[in-house]
Amino acid sequence: MIELSNITKSFGEKTVLDDISASFRPGITNLIIGGSGSGKTTLLKCMVGLHEVDSGEVCYSGKDFTKMDFRERIPIRKEIGMLFQGSALFDSMNVEQNIMFPMDMFTTMSLKEKRERVNFCLKRVSLDPADVNRKMPSELSGGMKKRVGIARAIALKPNYLFCDEPNSGLDPLTAIVIDKLIYEITDEYNMTTVVVTHDMNSVMEIGENVIFLHQGRKWWEGTKEEIRRTDNKELNDFVFATSFAKNMKED
Ligand SMILES: Nc1ncnc2c1ncn2[C@@H]1O[C@H](COP(=O)(O)OP(=O)(O)OP(=O)(O)O)[C@@H](O)[C@H]1O
């Protein structure tokens, strides 16, 4: 469980996050949506400590992350898996080395144990270790890179999974496959998963809890089913901006 209380963040004069409170429960996919510049990525970065908040609390299972120093944060960081935009694989490392990286950083596992874990994680994302282990990221398709990114994110059996635009750059069918994968592993490992997206297909497929940010504020919160019935003007304008999505709205 992650709980945000009254998060505020400014860059210079500009308030980017304005008094955001929200709860993200384990075992479900929590989505953060909103227009460009609404503060989604900033909020995600505040949650993992890549930005410091100006005020407010980010609590992991009741422990306030914002008040901790670097050392105190390490045990929580070990429980966090991250899939950032573009997969962020290390170009100079092959697939196996990429997935081993968090284990090298945070564990004393033997090489044999690490290899077993890499193979397990690759199989979990439906990749064949014998086929991809020695490949470099440049040799993989966009969808495969995302899968490897997810395999690396789950390598340390995280309790928390953060994904920033996991579908960016993917064709619609591959995007659905990646969404389903995130949804399945969230349920399977009972992770607290937070996904930043502006992909409406994702919202309608896996939006079990959706937070809508508008002008740096939490404007609306609900489920994918509730979005179809919402009267919130800004949310409607955002979600049903495309004719495809309009067809999905209930009368
Ligand atoms: N490091 C920074 N320094 C100054 N301003 C920043 C910084 N990071 C973000 N911003 C500003 O904060 C606002 C919110 O940015 P953010 O990236 O969180 O939006 P977003 O909702 O994720 O947008 P997008 O969907 O386009 O990725 C923007 O106006 C952006 O210019």
Image (spheres, helix red, strand yellow):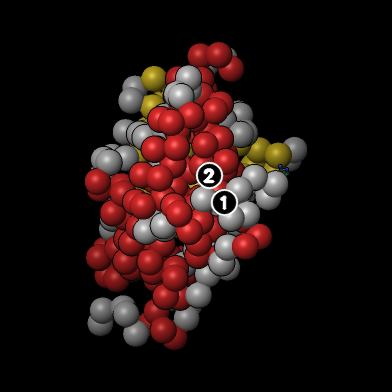
Vertical side of 24 occupied by 227: above or below = below
Image coords of residue 113 (percent x, y):
41, 30
Q: Tell me which residue sits at (50%, 65%) in the image.
A: 143
- Disc 1 CB within 8 Å of nearest ligand 1 atom: no
Quick one: label 1, few (<14), some, or many (20+) residues within 10 Å?
few
Q: Tell me which residue sits at (27%, 41%) in the image.
A: 189
Residue 196 showing in the rendered view: no
Kind of element beneath mark 1 = loop
Residue 54 showing in the rendered view: yes
Vertical side of 137 occupied by 168: above or below = below
Q: Are marks 2 and 1 in contact (CB under 8 Å)?
A: yes
Q: Quadrant of the C terminus?
A: bottom left
Q: Which mark is residue 134?
A: 1
Kind of element beneath mark 2 = helix
Of the residues under marks 2 and 1, which one precedes in the sequence? 2
Image coords of residue 32 (percent x, y):
44, 52
Vertical side of 123 occupied by 51: above or below = above
Image coords of residue 70 (percent x, y):
58, 17
- Considering depth in this image, is 126 or 4 the residue closer to the camera? 126
Looking at the image, how many numbered discs can be counted on the residues? 2
* Residue tagged 2: 96
- Residue farthest to the right, as pictured: 12
State the separation of the CA atoms marked 2 and 1. Answer: 7 Å
Q: Quadrant of the N terminus?
A: top left
Image coords of residue 44 (percent x, y):
52, 42
Vertical side of 175 occupied by 44: above or below = above
Q: Tell me which residue sits at (39%, 79%) in the image.
A: 245
- Considering depth in this image, is 118 or 45 the residue closer to the camera? 118
Instruction: Write down the quadrant of residue 52 in the picture.
Output: top right
Could you tell me the amino acid type at mark 1? Arg
